[in-house]
Image: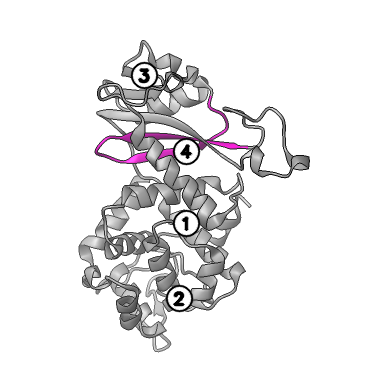
Amino acid sequence: MKELASNTDSINASSRLDFSKFDSLISLMTYFKDNATCKDFLAEQRWGDDVVCPLCGRHHCRKRSDGRYRCPDCLTNFSVTQGTIFDNTKIPLQKWFVAMYMISAHKKGISSYQLGRDIGVSQKTAWFINQKIRLLYGQEVESLSGDVECDEAYIGGKEKNKHESKRTEGTQGRSLKTKEAVFGMAQRGGAIVAKHVSDTQGKTLSPIIRQLVKPGSRIFTDEYIGYKSLYDSEYTHSIVHHNSGEYVVGDASTNRVEGFWSQLKRMILGIYHFVSATHLQRYVDEAVFRYNTREQNESDRFRMMFGRSLNVVRYADVKAAA
């Protein structure tokens, strides 16, 4: 996690091109007019004037006449895409760049059907692109402090919207018979962290809180018994009793994290319609990325995503949880 962030920072710092010029999809497509331009851009952002062998780390590798590079030490021939998410791709880099821009720019995401139509690939290929780029969203927040709101959300269809023959009894409240649980923590004035969890018992939530929230912070929750371990702890714990109609008591509330839940659910219901438990964390990561970068513009998001794309994401990584 730390390594990924540092690599991205170094790429941005050494960038020769002002990413702010990509303030629209038209400007992006105008600049990346062909595959050769994309490869030159990728090489410049990745290495600058000093091409490094991705296998042995040798500097000052030379470019061959066929566009590939050759390492004088290990005698390996390699391409500019080797060691990136574009490695061994048969899809033109223009389509990858456009897809990255569109996926990061859309406020609620973009479905594989729509992405496939927009960039001219099949739905199956668009799903693969979407999933591979979604792996770049990994949450990098290491700690939260100050005022932190904690809450849980339950992802799954409402029983009342199902056909009577497909309804399951006893799924009201916090039941996980037909739903998946996501636990979220929102630092006021800071970032949000959200994780797909197996259940919402105190023994599951407490270690996550203690791992990510610094001691001495103020924690705001509802009256759920799963937060009982916070009553006498290293935190100042304030409770909002939702069952009694309380939503704001002084400065105590969980409105920020609940606002994030509404965005996550709108993204799933409005764009993707269905998300499997296997891939749920990836969609949560996507929603967290959008929320934490909501004040950034499209070019800033594209710069961040492009920097992350230079780290290895293999096909096996995409299929691992399938």
Give how far apart the Cα atoms at labels 1 and 3 are.
35 Å
Question: Mark 4 and 3 residues: CB-CB less than 8 Å, in contact?
Answer: no
| Residue 199 coordinates in the image, percent (x, y) | 56, 29
Q: Which residues are magenta?
A: 179-200
Give how far apart the Cα atoms at labels 3 and 2 are.
49 Å
Give how far apart the Cα atoms at labels 2 and 1 are.
16 Å
Tell me which corner region of the image, top left, top right, bottom left or bottom right, holds residue 21. Answer: bottom left
Question: Mark 2 and 4 residues: CB-CB less than 8 Å, in contact?
Answer: no
Q: Which element carries disc 3, helix, strand or loop?
A: strand
| Residue at position x 38%, y 40% in the image | 259
What amino acid is labelled 1 in the image?
Answer: Arg
**Against 268, is 91 above or below?**
below
What amino acid is labelled 3 in the image?
Answer: Ile
Read off the residue under disc 3.
Answer: 239
Q: Is residue 148 magenta?
A: no
Asked whether 193 or 75 is in front, the reply is: 193
**Against 260, is 307 above or below?**
below
Q: Is residue 59 visible?
A: no
Sequence order check: which comes first, mark 3 or mark 2? 2
Sequence order check: which comes first, mark 2 or mark 1? 2
Read off the residue under disc 2.
Answer: 95
Q: Is residue 187 magenta?
A: yes
Give how far apart the Cα atoms at labels 4 and 1 are.
15 Å
| Residue 249 coordinates in the image, percent (x, y) | 30, 21
Sequence order check: which comes first, mark 1 or mark 3? 1
Callout 3 crowding tier (Cα within 10 Å): few <14, some 14–19, many ≥20 = many
Task: Name the dominant secondary structure of the magenta segment.
Answer: strand
| Residue at position x 44%, y 72% in the image | 96
Read off the residue under disc 1.
Answer: 134
What amino acid is labelled 2 in the image?
Answer: Lys
* Outermost residue, top side: 232
